[in-house]
Image: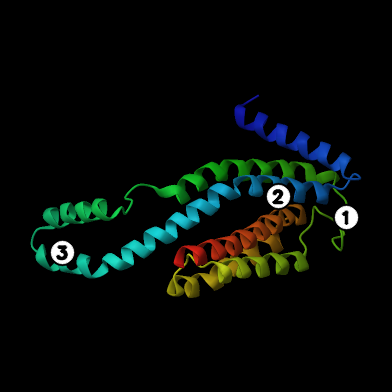
Amino acid sequence: MEPWNAFVAVIRQLLGSLAQGLDHSYGLAIIAMALAVRLGLLPWTLRAAEQGWVQRRKMEALKPQLEQLAKRHASDPAAHAAAMRAMYREHGVGLGMGGGLLTALVQAPLGLGVYSAIRQGLAGAGSFLWIPRLARPDLWLALLVAALSYAAIALNPAMSTQAKTLLQVLPVLVSFVVVWHAAAGLGLYWAASSGVNVLQAALLRRRLRRLAL
């Protein structure tokens, strides 16, 4: 068995065991799995978001100096790039991938593995709460995911006002359309993950308020 298939099979077996322990509820098992994954990664995603906010504040403070560098080295792009790198090093501005991208690279295969395991296990899944069949899409679940996505963006203090305005509509629409056309079991995983995103945004807002004092 290929490593990826083996990885997905382990997650699928874990979901089945969770469902048996949760009164044979596959929906509860999906939510429990999503919360375990996202809450386990929360310290890293929260730290990456905080570091992104700090880096953005430093860049905003350096904007006048960067504009002066651009004018001073307008005819020499190489000298301009070298001067920018030196200024970034002096003020502690990171030039690498950043914690956010590294966290995403770790989270992506894990999330894809859980999604694949859920998709494979939905054939025998039944109902959950108001959802008649977890193997079929559900409009109300899609609306819930869209609302949670909007709340996470609206509460995120590490995002600039301009970026927040641009990003409030697109992720909400994308999440709604995707969940509306996907199996409700996958939508449950997305909803639980979005709930953790709201929690992360609230915690980040609290931490950044302390840093600003």
Q: Residue furthest top?
A: 1
For the residue pair 70 and 209, the one nearer the viewer reads as: 209
In this figure, which residue is indicated by the disc labeled 2? 35
Residue sitting at x 22%, y 52%: 85
Q: Which mark is residue 69?
A: 3
Mark 2 or mark 1: name the one nearer the start of the chain. Answer: 2
Label 3: which secondary element? helix
Numbered tag placed on residue 127 in the rendering: 1
Q: Mark 2 or mark 3: which comes first in sequence?
A: 2
Marks 1 and 3 close (CB-CB < 8 Å): no
Q: Residues within 10 Å of mark 3 (few under 14, many from 20)?
A: some
Count of marks overlaid on the render: 3
Q: Residue at x 45, y 74 (%)?
A: 161
Amino acid type at mark 1: Ser
Contact flag, marks 2 and 1 (Cβ < 8 Å): no
Residue furthest right as drawn: 23
Could you tell whether 159 is left or right of 143 in the image?
Answer: left
Categorize mark 1 by other alpha carbons within 10 Å: few (<14), some (14-19), many (20+): some
Location of residue 68 by image quarter: bottom left
Depth check, mark 1 against mark 3: the one in front is 3
Q: Amino acid at mark 2?
A: Leu
Is 72 left or right of 48, judged from the image as shown? Answer: left
Quadrant (top left, top right, bottom left, bottom right) of the N terminus: top right
Mark 1 residue element: loop
Residue 96 position, x and y percent, is 35, 47
| Residue at image location 82% in from the left, 38% down from the top | 16
Name the residue nearer the viewer: 56 or 183: 56
Query: Within the image, what quadrant is residue 64 found in?
Result: bottom left
The residue carrying pointer 2 sits among few (fewer than 14), some (14 to 19) or many (20 or more) residues within 10 Å by Cα, namely: some
Residue type, mark 3 in image = Leu
Task: Say which label, 1 or 3, has the lower sequence index.
Answer: 3
